[in-house]
Amino acid sequence: MKFTLNFAHVLLLLVAISSCKPSNPELKPGIWRATLKTSSAAEIPFNFELHDSADVRYITIINGKERFRVDEITFNSDSVFIQMPLFDSEIRAKNKGGILTGTWIKHLADSSTVMEFNAKAGDDWRFFKANKNSSANIAGRWSTTFTSIDSTDTTIAVGEFLEENGRLTGTFLTSTGDYRFLEGTVSDNKLYLSCFDGGNAYLFTANIQNDSTILDGKFYSGFAGVENWWASKDENAILPDAYTLTALKDGLKKIDFTFPALDGRKVSLSDEKYKNKVVLVQFFGSWCPNCMDETAYLVPFYNKYNKKGVEIIGLAYERTKDFERSKQNVERLHKRFNVPYQMLITGYTKDKADVLLSLPMLNSFEAFPTLIIIDKKGEVRKIHTGFNGPGTGKYYTEFVQEFEKTIEAMLAEN
């Protein structure tokens, strides 16, 4: 039987073939503006840059001076999946070339938090395309108070801001850590700051009454967190001494523990490797951005001081007691920073009560990260709560100088 194809048949065949091909539009390289929507419909904006060179595609999330690189980007038809290198979170979105729409998913122990995610290529602004003039100058140090919506919980903080041509950067320091690299603007006598680092999403808004008073502040954290805040300019604002917040039980001078390393081998503080050494015990979690900053500091610190007699042990307190899941998350952090010291899976969660169960020698535990400093005799000399990272500028520099001076003095002891 003779079979012929006319023009109509060919056209129908081509349409059928093309309709079977998966749609995979290219993401546009360059700057993007993204938003995450809270339960109260507030939008938390941030920017990222997409790099596409020699078939290597990655993004850098932009917050002030920080550039946070994210390498794990995969595609399936018209969908894009962005796995954060830390914090056990991911972005899942539909890809329309210059538009992404989807969700940011933060995985918790037994559930996940989901926030609406949208992004547009080519927008390099964060809050406004053009700022309205503002007469206030808020650069400097601010004594700040955060309160829960029901006024039952209060946090004292110190705000540190820099303002240049309408661009506002800085952070808030608390006794347990800082809010990392915040970026935003001052426009029409209103303040706007935000941050997204894969682990946390923050938005700060407020009215600027004058150069010395900030009122009616709102702090949005993640999907549902909301607090009130206000501040007054105070160049002498200070926080409690970070070495006074956590302590051992009365009469105790030493701690000890045994937990498995990432390879499953049991490691103890009493092992020969740690005897007659200055030992730092780091309490951390892969879910904790301040812990990320501390780890980024401790890695070069260890490389500098290890041959002089310093050892570090990291104790991981994850969201779950499941060893394999905890191990997977800690391995991401370990690989990200090329950590040269042992990181142990404690099997306990980040709950403060769990921490005290894991080390019953502790009388209190306030926050992650916490760093216990042990001398050559095996005695606890200091316990430092929290970590003010590079986003705090001079406070970070001052901590590094003071901390390394302390370690050098302990190394010099007989």
Image (cartoon, helix red, strand yellow):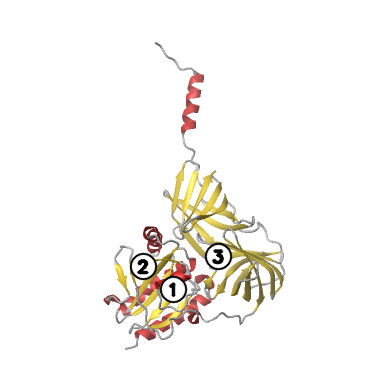
Q: Which image quarter: residue 159?
A: bottom right
Cα gap from disc 2 to disc 1, whole angstroms = 19 Å
Q: Which mark is residue 227?
A: none
Q: Nearer the viewer, mark 2 or mark 3?
A: 2
Q: Nearer the viewer, mark 1 or mark 3?
A: 1
Q: Earlier in the sequence, mark 2 or mark 1?
A: 2
Q: Look at mark 3 in the image and give the residue it sits on.
A: 64
Is residue 238 at least partly visible in the picture?
yes
Which residue extends farthest bottom?
Answer: 414
Q: Which residue is pictured at 53% across the width and 68% down the height?
A: 180
Tell me the kind of residue under disc 1: Leu
Q: Look at mark 1 in the image and give the residue it sits on.
A: 356
Q: Earlier in the sequence, mark 2 or mark 3?
A: 3
Tell me the element at label 1.
helix
Tell me the kind of residue under disc 2: Met
Q: Which image quarter: residue 226?
A: bottom right
Q: Look at mark 2 in the image and give the residue it sits on.
A: 343
Cα gap from disc 1 to disc 3, whole angstroms = 36 Å
Which residue extends farthest top?
Answer: 1
Q: Which residue is pictured at 30% across the width and 82% down the height?
A: 276
Q: Is mark 1 in CB contact (under 8 Å) with mark 3? A: no
Residue closest to the eye, 96 or 6: 96
Tell me the element at label 2.
strand
Residue closest to the eye, 266 or 383: 266
Q: Is residue 192 left or right of residue 49?
A: right
Q: Horizontal and vertical percent for residue 362?
A: 43, 78
Q: Quadrant of the C terminus?
A: bottom left
Residue closest to the eye, 203 or 124: 203
Quick check: 401 above or below 334?
below
